[in-house]
Amino acid sequence: MSNDLTPMFAPGGVVVIGASRQSGKLGAAMARSLATFPGARALVNARRPEPGEGVYASVAEAAAHIDGRLDLAVLCVPAAGCAQALAEAAAAGCRAALVCAGGFGEAGPEGDEYAEALLRVAQETGIRLLGPNTSGFFAPHLALRASFVPAAGQLPAGDIAVVAASGGVNHALSFDLVTAGNGISLGVGIGAGLDVTAADVLAHLAGDERTTAVALHLETVPDGPRLVDAVRLAAAVKPVVALVVGRSDVGDFARSHTGALATSWRTTRAALRQAGAVVVDDEREMVDALTALSRIQLRPDPDPGLAVVTAQAGPGLLLADRAGADGIRMPELADATQRTLSELLPPLTYQRNPVDTGRPAQTFARVLDTTATDPGVDLLAVYALTEPDSVDLASAAQDAGLGARFPAVVVVGGLPEDVAEQRARLHKAGIPALTGPTSAAHAVRALVTHARQRAVRTGGSEPEMSASVPSGPLDEDAAKTFLASLGIRTPGRVACDARSDAHGALRLLGGPVAVKVLDAAILHKTEIGGVHLGVRTPDELDAALDAIGPDRRYLVEAMAPAGVDLVLGARRDPVFGPVVLAGLGGTAAEALADVAIRLAPLSAAEAAGMPDDLAARALLDGWRGGPVLDRGEFGRVVAALAAALAASPDTAEIEINPLRLTADGLIALDAVVVHTADR
C-alpha cells in the first residue's frame, strides 16, 4: 500500500459514486461541492445513469469517457455497498477514496463486517481510504472541496493545515482560524480512520511546502509509536499544535500506584509534547497558537525572555500576570534600554518591563524598536487600541522591524472593522495580530513552549543504554540491588532468613532501622502490616518481627534522613509502549494526578525537565529550607530506569516509591519489579 497521499489530497480527477439528483442526498451535496474543482470530474449512479449529463453507470465507464485520470473516488453509498464500490473504483484506476457514510464499527456487529470488508479491499488493491464516517476534506488552493458542508467552499487558501479526528471539528477549527485572519492549506476529518490515520496525514504534511503549521485534534490513538514518529517528522520542519480530547475520562487504571496516575489523556499529551508538538487545552488556545506559530518562531532557547509594551496599563498588566502564571521570564530591561525609553516616554510611565507608553505618540515605533533590541528580550508582546488621531499601529510595528527582524505578537483592540483592517496589514507583514490579552497570552505561551522544546531536541543527548532487568521474581532486596547497578542510591540493608539474622543486622546497622517482610509476591507491604519503621532496640525488633509473623524472610534497612518523597515508575502503556512517570509522593499527589510522563527510553537531559511539569515543583526547590533537587541527578536516575524497562521486554513495571529527596541527594526507599508473566 502506497504511503503517497497525493492522489487523495491533490488528485488529477475526482469521481462521485452514488451521485444523486435529490438535493437532500449526500451524493447530491458532494457533487455540488466538487463542481468547482478544475480537474477531471465524473458522477456515477448505477441506477439512473445519464451519460449525456455526465452521469455514468460505473467508474470504468466514466474513466473511459473522461479526459484525465480519476485518482480520487468519493463514495456516497450506504455502508453495505461501500466495499463493492471501492473495489470497482480501484479496478478502474482510482488510487484514493473518501468514504463519508456511517454505519460501520459504531453500528455494532453488522457494521464491523462492513468495515472489515472495506479494509480488506483497500489492503488487497492498495487504494488509500479516508474515513468512513467523516464529512470529508478540503484543499482551498486547488478549489477542491470534498465535503458536504457548503460553507467549506468559502474558506480562503492559506498555510495552516487541520488534521482532526472529527469531520465536524475539522470544519469548526478551520472556520475559527479564518475568523482569526488565517487561511487553510488542507483540512482533513479522519473519521473512523480505517486506513488513513492522523499519522499518515502528518507525514504527508511534513513535505507540503504550502503548510507552515499544523493543527492536530485527537480523540483516540490506534498506534502510539507511529503517531509519535509522524509528529516528530512534521514538528522537525514546522510547528504542530495538538489538542487531545479526554481530560475527564481517566480510563482503566493500571494496578500500580504510578499507573493509577497516568490516564490515557495525560499519556497522550505527554507523548505528543515529547515528540515536539505544542499541546493546548482548548480550541481557542489552538487558534491563537497557530495564528502566531504559522508566522513567527523563536530560536531554540530553554528560557526565552518576554517584554510587554502596552499603550493601556490594564491590558498590559493582564498580559504580564498571565506570563508569570505560565512560568515565562519577564526580565527587567537593561539600564541602557531604560535610559533610551526615558527620553521617548512621559516621566510617569513604567519603563522597566512591562513598558507603559501612555497614549501612543509618534515615538511609539522607536519605543518598540528599543524594547525589542534589549539583550534580555527574545519576544515582544504589544497592546494598543485603534484610537482616533492616535498612532497607526500596523505602520509603527513595521517601522520598528517587528516580524521581519524581531519576533512579536500584537494585540489590536477597537471596533471590529478597525481591528480587521489593522490585523490584515499586520498579518501581511508577518506579524501575528490577536484580539485580546488572553489570546495574546495563548500565542506567547505557544511561542515560548515551541522554543523550549526545540532547545531540548537540539541540545539533548542520546537516550541512556542499560542492562536488562534480571529474570524471575525479584523481592525488594534483589530489586534494590538491580537499582544500585544502575547507579541509583539505596539505603544500607541486610536480607535476613531468620530472627537471629535480623538481630545481627540491627547490631551491624545500628538504629533506627526499618524492618520489612521480604517476599517478591507481596507488592504492598504496608497493607498487611509488613513494614515497621524507627526500630532501635532488640525488644522493638522482636515486636516488629512478631507482627510480621513467623516463617518469613525479613529486610532490615537503615532509616533514611527526612526529605521530600517522590514516586518514580516505568511501565508499559498499552498504546505508547514504555513510559516513565514521576510525581510527588503521598495520597494528595495521586488524588490530584500531579505527575510528569515521558516516553522511554529518553536522555538524561529530557528527563531532567520532568519536575517542571509538576504543580508542586516548588517543594523540590528548597521549600522552607528543605532539600533542593539536583536536576542532573534526577535526570540520570529517570533515564536509567526508563532505559532498563525499554531493554527488558519481559518486564511490565519498575517502581520506586518513595524515591526520597534528601540533603545528600536522591535515595530509593522501596522498589518493586513486576514481570509481564506475573500480571
Image (spheres, helix red, strand yellow):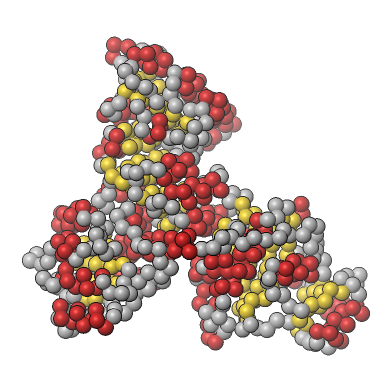
Identify whether 585 is placed above or below 537: above
Q: Nearer the viewer, residue 597 or 148?
A: 597
Q: Quadrant of residue 484?
A: bottom right
Picture residue at 59% right of the left edge, 71% below the top: 634
- Residue 399 sits in which quadrant? bottom left
Q: Is residue 667 left or right of residue 128?
A: right
| Rendered location of residue 96, percent (x, y) | 44, 29
Residue appearing at x 73%, y 59% in the figure: 469
Image x and y of residue 649, in percent:
70, 52
**Rendered location of residue 246, percent (x, y):** 50, 53
Q: Residue at x 73, y 78 (%)?
A: 491
Question: Is residue 525 something that shows in the picture?
Answer: no
Residue 631 appears in the picture as rendered: yes
Q: Residue at x 68, y 71 (%)?
A: 488
Residue 473, how many percent across, how many down? 80, 60
Q: Is residue 459 left or right of residue 290?
A: right
171 to 483, vertically: above or below: above
User: Is residue 593 depicted above or below 239 in this figure?
Assistant: below
Q: Is 343 placed left or right of 303 in the picture?
A: left
